[in-house]
Image: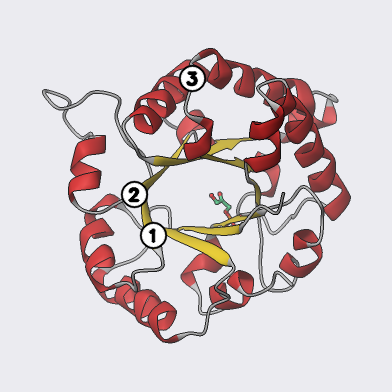
Amino acid sequence: MARKFFVGGNFKMNGTLSSIKEIVDNLNKSELDSNVEVVISPPSLYLLPTREHLRKEIEVAAQNVYDKPNGAFTGEISVSQLKDSNITWTILGHSERRTILGESDEVVSTKTKYATDNGLGVIWCCGESLEEREAGNTISVITKQLDSLKAQNPDWSKIVIAYEPIWAIGTGKVATTQQAQDVHKAIRDWLKGVSDKVSDETRVLYGGSVNESNCGELSKQPDIDGFLVGGASLKPAFVKIINCHQ
Ligand SMILES: O=C(CO)COP(=O)(O)O
């Protein structure tokens, strides 16, 4: 089954009202491959103005969401608040939140379960550190992260997986196409343990120093169904990444 190519732009904690408006204006006026699903993720303060000005075919994602309906959770945003603002996706489990903010596999899995059960799409991130790769533990680290998610029995039809090797994020050190394809294939095989349908239908994105020069080769790999782009999503060249898939 052909999986629709998916390109996400994770702005992280970057941008201002005016710079994000420029990005939105650029996306609004650009010719985009209609076979590609595009989702951009500005910081929470800019979600609503982004949604209001962005062309409707592109969806908007939060960078995090909480797993309670509402209440005394200072600093958090709820799924229903996102949906109320027509924000239909969230990123969860980004390595920066796992490492800097200490989010455990369990926290990420619980939030993913809550978000998908309540109708939000989730770009669920996983990936290994350099030490883990060098010790030969890449697949076991990712399997542990995936096992934690599976234990929550989430709605897989709402999940897009992003494989982001931590050593490739913001370093300019992209995984080779073969390194990426090998891990994506391992994730695809692991998904068969959920079901053949989930394995066939779940998109697995690559993230980590994706740019307009390396995206073409990566996109040709059979198990790479798109990208989660950081730095390059803030630049006009993001359009070239969206359109790189032939
Ligand atoms: O972390 C990333 C996307 O979520 C990748 O960031 P860079 O593309 O800047 O390496």
- In this view of the protein, which residue sits in the foreground, 34 or 208? 34
Secondary structure of the residue carrying numbered label 3? loop
**Residue at disc 2, CB closer than 8 Å to ligand 1:** no
Q: Nearer the viewer, mark 3 or mark 2?
A: 2
Whether residues under marks 1 and 3 lie with C-beta atoms below 8 angstroms apart, the answer is: no
The three-letter code of the residue at mark 2 reads Thr
Question: Which quadrant holds residue 4?
Answer: bottom right
Q: Is residue 50 left or right of residue 72?
A: right
The residue labelled by disc 1 is 59
Q: Is residue 238 above or below residue 154?
A: below
Residue 117 is at least partly visible in this image: yes
Whether residues under marks 2 and 1 lie with C-beta atoms below 8 angstroms apart, the answer is: yes
The residue labelled by disc 3 is 104
**Alpha-carbon distance for marks 1 and 3?**
27 Å
Marked residue nearer the N-terminal end (3 or 2): 2
**Residue at disc 1, CB closer than 8 Å to ligand 1:** no
Name the quarter where the C terminus is drawn: bottom right
The three-letter code of the residue at mark 3 reads Ser
Q: Is residue 162 above or below residue 67?
A: below
Which residue sits at x=43%, y=78%?
A: 27
Question: Which quadrant holds residue 179?
Answer: top right
Q: Position of residue 118 (x, y in %)?
A: 31, 31
Q: Position of residue 192 (x, y in %)?
A: 73, 26
